[in-house]
Structures are given as C-alpha cells and as structure tokens.
Amino acid sequence: MIIETAQHYLRTRRASVGIVAGVIIAVCLVSMLWTTGVVSSQPETRLYYVNEVTQAESIRNALDVPPMPDDSGKPNLVQASFFTCSTPDQKWAGYYNKIDDAAVEAVRKALAGLDLSQTAFMPSIYKKNLLIRLPAPGSPWVHADSPQGQAIVKQLRCPHDPQHAFFLTLPEQR
C-alpha cells in the first residue's frame, strides 16, 4: 500500500519531485565540498553559463552575475540550468537565467565579498530580480517568481522519456 502510494505520487508529480531532488543533490554537493575543504574560504563554486548568441557553453564562478560580457564585450553570457535524466553524461538545458538589467549593478554590489562557505542563500535582491527563459532562441525573459516563470519550471521533462525523473547537474567543482 505504501509503495503503491509513493509510486502514484512520483508519477503524478514528476516535475516537482525532479526539481526538489535536483536542489537537494546540489545543496548536498556544495555542502560536501565546503566541509571537506575542497572549496576554500574564497569559494570557487562554479555554474554553467551559455552565450545567447553563439550557444557556446562555459563554466564560471557562481558569483558572476549574469548577464556577463562575452568576448565581443556584449552582455550575452547567462547562466544555464542543465539537467540529466537516466544517462548522467547527456545533459540538457532546462532554462537560462539572468538578473534584470536595471538591477545588475546593485546585485553585484550585494554579492561582492559574499562567502558561499558561510551561506548558501543569495540575497533577496538577487531572487527579486531573477529572470528566466526557455533555451529556444527568441523566447522571452520573464521574472522567475511570476506565473510565466513558474510555468517554465513546471514544464521541465526529460526530452526522450517524459515519465523519467530528472536532476539538476553542476559542473565539476574545484
């Protein structure tokens, strides 16, 4: 009975379960890195970034506030949230995120000197100004906490098997 109820819950709420599981794994990974000393007091926690124009992926410090300038000097680098399904080496972009242009400098000041080994929480100014969009070219940027932003997160599914759970993936940490 309990197993059947759990299986039903997982089938009917797969996106929510995948997101929660991804966040838990990410927090555990970052916590493990901090407690083992892999991440110093000046952390190098890293995230994926993507150039919106060229689609080139890169890995940068988690405290780099997107949009960041690319090689041409234009603010085309944004954070990319990648996920994996049943095959860990096959990641896919679920959504991109950046900070609203009007708040970028204020957010950078708020994050200056923030030590991720002391807190895993971003200041409220970061969350309040977070924009997300689908990776499809031309998709609109929306506030992450808006109904449209929530819809982007809720629609996440494994590309080849929508019934399968998915997990947030992070680059190798130094």
Image: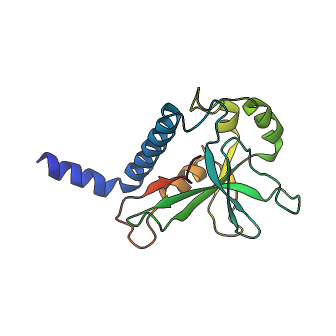
Going 68% across and 37% down the picture, which residue do you hit? 126
Furthest-front residue in this view = 37
Q: Is residue 147 left or right of residue 86?
A: right
Q: Is residue 85 left or right of residue 38?
A: left
Image height check: is 100 above or below 128? below
Q: Is residue 154 left or right of residue 174?
A: left
Going 72% across and 68% down the picture, which residue do you hit? 138
Q: How is the image coloured?
A: rainbow
Quarter of the rendering containing residue 103 = top right
Percent across and percent down for residue 136 are 64, 69
Percent across and percent down for residue 70 are 82, 59
Give whichever of 130, 114 is nearer the camera: 114
Image height check: is 108 above or below 118? below
Image height check: is 132 above or below 37? below
Furthest-right residue in this view = 73
Going 37% across and 49% down the picture, which residue do you hit? 17
Percent across and percent down for residue 147 are 57, 49
